[in-house]
Image (tube, grey):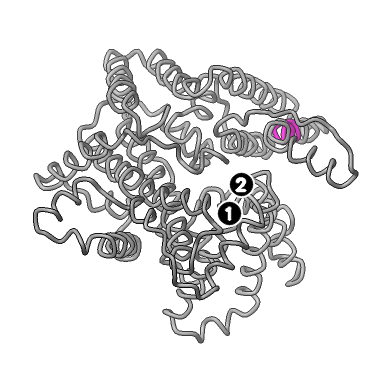
Amino acid sequence: MLFNSYIFILLFLPLCILGYFALNHFQKYTLGQLFLLGMSLWFYGYFNVAYLFIIIASILINYGVYLLIDKFRGRPACRRLMAAGVAANVGILFYYKYMDFFIGNVNALFRTNLSLLRIVLPLGISFFTFQQISFIVDAYRGELPRYNLLYYASFVAFFPQLVAGPIVTHDELVPQFLDREKKKLNMDNLAQGIYIFVLGLAKKVLLADKFGGAVTYGFTTLEQLNSISALIVMLSYTIQIYFDFSGYCDMAIGIGKMLNIDLPVNFDSPYKALTITEFWDRWHMTLTRFFTKYVYIPLGGNRKGRVRTCINVMIVFLVSGFWHGASWNFVFWGLCHGIFVVITRTCRRFFERLHPALNWLLTFSFVNVMWVFFRAETFTQAFTLLRKLVSWNFDNFDPLFIEMFRITELKKILRVFRVETMYPPVLITGFFLTAMLLILGCGNAYEKMRKFKPTGFRLLTTLFLLVWCVFSFTGISTFLYFNF
């Protein structure tokens, strides 16, 4: 089930909120938590009923490992149980996400003809697997209290963050489920949550999907691109993935707020970053936190000298690249980010002497180019787009690109004012300027939440955007991070 769908907005979300708070109102707290868990499993199983068996089995296996770790605490078996639990999670993730990639590379390397398994990747498996790995490791370290199965399952399956993050830890979520004060309907939180949810929905439907159309068309007509259209494709994907992921994060935060649940910050205006290290402090923050706590620090972090620190950084970014997808493109993307982070850390004083605007331009340009490899299905596609970009060919601009940015409502307005002939250049330029203004000049969801006050203007804005988005659902699309 998608946040940007009729069934979610018109049926699932109202039913979830009403049912959860109604049960809690009558002090049926356990039943209310079961209802929330059931709604979360419905949300997940709506994509594919077979996915339910995977996530339920994963929850039961990991909870069993947790109980065994607690039982054998202080004995040698405890460490082996933790290692086995982590290995089992990694193994399941490898089977579903990387087995065909592994078989394909074995065939290419040894000239074998092994059949691919054609395994369908369960949505969000990378997210809920990492979440459970963190739980098992924290249990081994003695960093969590005793939780029953209901609250553990709710922690793993809580639907706003289930399929695309944020990757939450037990102490961020379970205590909120246990807090009875949070089980009462809070109209302020409900209003704030609806407002943030609709802003995220608008980012996805009205901005990300519009730029996504240009990206899809561009990558299917790479050989026909000139330098201008190649630049449009590259910048469009940079903006698409920003608003797509930002929109999802906002909607997840908003839904959580409606249910009186505060989810951690996961996206903090990363394109405002002046360095690549700052970019990763702002982009997918809970994933960065996970790799820092469970990979970088156990490897030694920065405690074993400069060379070892650089190696640890490279390992983290290679793992991060591979986590995003079973493709050498993602590995290369992670490798390049790791190299740039190492260069930035090593040459910190050099970058500090540069003007902030130049630092921003270097970082933003690097991120743009790297997104090409992130989006492309092959290296050939990526290098073709970059070759077209620097070809200095400004002829034969494909007019169909203009169609990707057309908005029916805007077209009618322009016709009234008799400026149809200005529409194509004005439209495309306006889209990019508006997007960059929103990215660089406006506060993000967390800043808006801190300043939120219910007003008539916010009410009208929210209603207007919600209605506009709902009427735009004819082109429903999934979130990019659902693929990871």
Pick the front one: 144 or 470: 470
Q: Please tell me whether the stretch drawn in magenta is mainly helix, strand or loop.
A: helix
- Residue 101's spot in the image, x, y percent? 74, 40
- Foreground of the two, 475 or 456: 475
Left or right of 11? Residue 465 is left
Assess whether residue 374 is covered by the magenta stretch.
no
In the picture, measured across the screen, residue 401 lies left or right of residue 141, that is left
- Give the magenta range: 85-91
Q: Quadrant of the N terminus?
A: top left
- As shown in the figure, which amino acid type bears the numbered disc 2? His
Q: Are marks 2 and 1 in contact (CB under 8 Å)?
A: yes
Question: Would you call the spot at circle 1 few (<14 residues within 10 Å), some (14-19), or many (20 or more)?
Answer: many
Q: Which residue is denoted by mark 2 in the rendering?
A: 324
Visible residue check, residue 442: no
Q: Residue 27: x percent and y percent?
A: 31, 14
Q: Is residue 204 above or below residue 307?
A: above
Residue at position x 54%, y 17% in the image:
49
For residue 432, above or below residue 456: below
